[in-house]
Amino acid sequence: MDQAVQWIDENQSKASLDRLSGRLSFLKFLRRYPVFLLAFGPPLFRSASIDATAGKIDLWSVLQVGLVSLIGFRAIYRLASSESIRIPKKIRSVLKFIFFLGVLFLLSATYSPSRLVSIAYSGLYLLTFACVVEFIADVYIAPPNWLQCLFHLRFIALLLIALDFVVLPFKPGLILSFEEGSGLHFSGGTIGPVTVLCPLIAIISAYVFLHSLEPKVRSIFFFLVGIAGVLSAQARGCELALLFSLSILALEWARTSKRSAYILISGFMAFILFFAAATGSIGGGRIWSTFNRGESAQGIATASGRTVMWHFAIQYCLKHPQGMGYVVGFRMLFKTYHAVGLTLDPSHIGNAHNCYVQVLADAGWLALAVYLIMLIKIIYVGWRFAKTPTQETPASCRVPLHVLRCTIVMLIYLLAGGLTSADGVVPLRTPFYWQNILIAVILGISANMIMAARAHVTESAERY
């Protein structure tokens, strides 16, 4: 690994004038790497969901599917017209799992309550997979300015949040959601989902602040913007997942030096003292009630009714190991299930509100096993290269490693958030595309590191 980093350091100066490795403007970056266009969602300017199972579509659905299809088929065309696709074996093994999962989703259409819709969603999944493969194959030969990947992702998230505020005065129902007992939530709806975008803004800003990758004032400002968005959404799952991800980020930063470790320990002790003082003055019961937004004990115990849905999906799949059919199976079958104690209307529940249970419901136990193995392999491959000590890494090579670490933390946030939301595995949802973009970046940087190691070995053999 150290040899790979040294090889990159020696050769990065030679490629400094390379157009593909230099800094690109935002629009040129999107044109060069169109997979990042998927980070826009794209946004939907409607609040009510369209029941595709009944053959209903609208203009926004056409535009959304059209954009994804255009980017996906472009990727397929570029891959098909390439003379050779060079991707390391270790990365190909991960891509095989991603593709095989898509095949299982496609096969689930044979027993889906609405075959055409399941086939359509499976097609969108495979088109997204093609975009990921195109990006990895492209950057394997000519890597981009990796730091720009982080900053442009943050910029896209900020644009979508700004779009929320533009739409808010005209169509507040698209942005705000109301829950009895906790009032209005600034959710962002289908335009700029706050529970996805704001935490990622906070993670990127916190990371670049700790490692001095941009001006401190800018990092602090964007971090506060992200935190404010998270608090305005009032989603416990989002808050806990962000806290978990920031803890990982802080622990990783503390390992870089003794000074960082002392600062983290001091900060943690100060937090404990502050929390103890707040509990004593305000009261633990009041803090607990505020955190749960005044929800009843039954609602807390059932995770706002989610455990009822998970129980239904697991019990169904114990009798039908193949699942219900991609996306549409759970949506249609659960409508006929009358859940005792469920506060939500079953006719408006679109998914299982858990990525892992959703994959199980979509294509059964085999699909869930493939999905979990795929995620483990992705994090393992990325972390294997990201764990290189920063102090031993040349200054010119630290950026790719920084981006890799930050991207892994963001992916961990999405996977932790997947415990209370299934949007990460459902096409045409913003978390689904952000998760795939992060996977593409992790595998792309890892592929470059593998290539660097091979090139260094070859160069050393020729030298001696």
Image: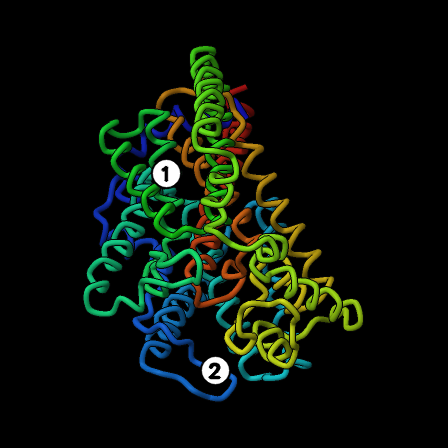
Residue 128, numbered label: none
Q: Residues within 10 Å of mark 1 (few under 14, many from 20)?
A: many
Can you say which quadrant of the picture contains the N terminus? top right
x and y, in percent, of residue 120 in the image:
51, 78
| 415 on left or right of 324 | left
Residue 204, numbered label: 1
x and y, in percent, of residue 442 in the image:
49, 43
Marks 2/1: CA–CA distance: 36 Å
| 299 on left or right of 266 | right
Residue kind at label 1, given as amino acid type = Ile
Residues 10 and 181: in front is 181
Residue at 66%, 70% in the rendered image: 340
Residue 253 appears in the picture as rendered: yes
Q: Reading the chain from its start, which is encountered first: label 2 or label 1?
A: 2
x and y, in percent, of residue 107 in the image:
66, 75
Residues 8 and 38: in front is 38
Q: Which residue is mark 2?
A: 52
x and y, in percent, of residue 186 in the image:
33, 56
Residue at 43%, 28% in the rendered image: 281
| Above/below status of 107 relative to 134 | below
Q: Residue furthest right?
A: 319
